[in-house]
Amino acid sequence: EAVARKHGLSPKTLGNWVRQYQDEVDDLMVRKQNETKQIQQDAAQFQDLQKKYEDAVKLLGEKELEIHILRDLVKKKYPDWK
């Protein structure tokens, strides 16, 4: 009340402003927390996808090597095979 009177305001007006500010700050904090949770979920999903990609690339390399070895074996057994 003293602060409001010191600045020539109605205590009710100052109280309304304070509540409005608190509501806005609370809304911003909730939004920020939701954004932070989403970023954490996105980061976890990205890491999971990155691991799956690396595993797939490794498996592809192994399969290509296996195909190369099998082709060499077939060529040795059947030299005319293309």
Image (spheres, grey):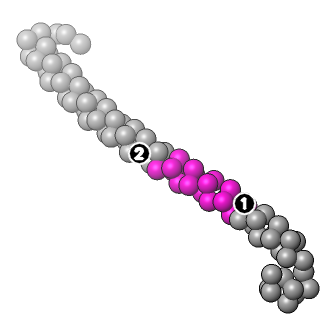
> Is residue 68 at least partly visible in the picture?
no
Check disc 1 and give the amino acid type.
Asp
Stretch of the chain drawn in magenta? 23-40
Q: Residue at position x 37%, y 40% from top?
A: 48
Image quadrant assignment for residue 7: bottom right
Residue 61, percent across and down? 25, 32
Give above or below for 69 relative to 58: above
Relative to residue 81, is residue 22 drawn left or right?
Answer: right
Residue 68, percent across and down? 19, 25
Could you tell me how far apart the alpha carbons at marks 2 and 1 are, in whole angstroms?
32 Å
Q: Residue at position x 48%, y 45% from top?
A: 42
- The image quadrant where one finds the N terminus is bottom right
Q: Which residue is mark 2?
A: 44
Frontmost residue, 19 versus 11: 11
Q: Which residue is mark 1?
A: 23
Along the polypeptide, which appears first: circle 2 or circle 1? 1
Count of numbered circles on the image = 2
Q: Residue furthest front?
A: 1
Give above or below for 11 relative to 28: below
Residue 34, percent across and down? 57, 50
